[in-house]
Image (cartoon, rainbow, N blue to C red):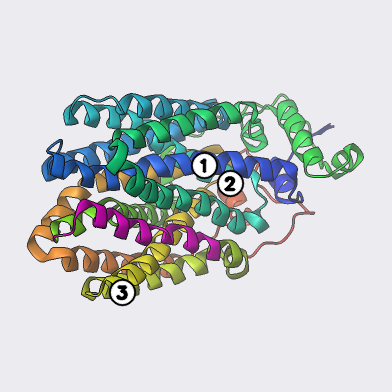
Amino acid sequence: MSTHVAAGVRLDNLPIGKFHRHLMVLVGLGMFFDSFDNTLSSAVLASMLPTGFSTLELNSLFLSFTYAGLAIGAAFAGWLSDRLGRGFAFQFNLALFGVLAVAAAFAPNMEVLIGLRFLMSIGMGAEYVICYGMITEFIPRSRRGRYLGVLGIFAGLGVSLSSLIGWLVIPIWSWRAMFILGGVGALITWWLRRGMPESPRWLESRGRHKDAEAVFERIARESGLSSQEVSSAAPQIANLENEKAEWVPFKVLFSRLVIRRTLVALLLTIISLFGSYTVTGWIPTFFVKQGMTVSSSLGFNAAIMSGYVLGPIVILLLADRLGRRNIIMTYGTLAAIVAAIYPFMREPALIIAIGFIMTCMVSSFLTLALGTVPEFFPTAFRFRGGGFAQTVGRICVISSPFVVLWLFNSLGIIGVILTLSGMYILVTLVVAAARVDTSAEALAQIAPNGDTADAPTADAVPHNPQR
């Protein structure tokens, strides 16, 4: 007999401790600078138009190449994380976009900037997949909604501070300072994260049981458990030390047991990304084209984008009580309603107030959608499932700048926002009808043979399938 770590169940039953809080800060910092660098395009592109450094068409190319890089990064992160480990992928992508962000600050023209942005976005796309996946890997299931809310706050701060700092910094030091700030911050975070351990779930799924047990014991001690408590809680299962871990092929995402999860994950990701990038990437440009000065546009945008912080705070308070599926449907419904109202606002105070509420809904839906998708899949192909959904989602939004531009030129901001409202209605109805079960028991049923990282045991805590 030997002690098998049963990583999934044991991690889910740990109390929240020092390790989880430390992990949350490091993952959150990565998400903050990823969101900061991703969102700076809003203020940067709007400021380039009056100077002649760029045009609306080049701005669209900038956004499309950004989305292409994000798609490649999401696919790369999924494969890299499942094949070589969460820890390696966790660091590699952050270093990539940090270095290239600094380089982008010195671009001599828009064409070079677009090329650097494409490469930089590969690292940014990977960071999104990995940060949301790390919450699923390490945070206990019963507290995961709360920590998704915390992660959303980090992301929201990155979005809102990017807009605020852009408003303050760009008129004085130009758009180049924005890339330097984001790149240096990402590299500092990379240095702070260098000591993070590998995921015990992943180690176990690859047959590295001794390593998984050692890492789990470290996490358990940092969570407040004594060595005796760690040992006594370890389930005794038949000898698996010499069992060969099999690499689960990508086609499992389209198998009979998994295909429904994959399709719901795709729809959630596509619409949450389209909504977020439409709001954050185009609102300042819309304001400029409607006659505002760049300074006024960035000021309005900074006020509206502060909604990216409030929405996730509500997630933090309610997600684990209502269940993640229920709160996703709630936010989807509210986003559709508020988006339908927004285009008809004319008074500056109402534009800011309703725009603020809309960003609350859009940012919360993005956090919940991207954070819940990794829970749809077992450990062995979790990051490829999440990465595939983000890859397809980002491929779909590559053309979104041109779609948005066409809608704006043809129908104005009303056409853009009402289209967005209809998409939120669609995804809410699909999530309501699909009823995808993310409980441990459901994951165990679709896990490949020999992968017990997500399987329940007799002492597992019952969970609400709606979560």
Q: Amino acid at mark 3?
A: Leu
Q: Of helix, strand and loop, which one carries label 3?
A: helix
Mark 3, other Cα within 10 Å: few <14 / some 14–19 / many ≥20:
few
x 51%, y 49%: residue: 154
Q: Give the residue at mark 2.
A: 135
Q: Earlier in the sequence, mark 3 or mark 2?
A: 2
Q: Which mark is residue 350?
A: 3
Q: Nearer the viewer, residue 132 or 297?
A: 297
Q: Nearer the viewer, residue 347 or 341?
A: 347
Q: Of helix, strand and loop, which one carries label 1?
A: helix
In the picture, the quarter occupied by the N terminus is: top right
The outermost residue toward the right is 228
Q: Amino acid at mark 1?
A: Cys
Q: Are marks 2 and 1 in contact (CB under 8 Å)?
A: yes
Vertical order, 91 against 154 (above or below): above
In the picture, the quarter occupied by the C terminus is: bottom right
Q: Earlier in the sequence, mark 1 or mark 3?
A: 1
Please give the range of residues in magenta: 291-314
Q: Give the residue at mark 1.
A: 131
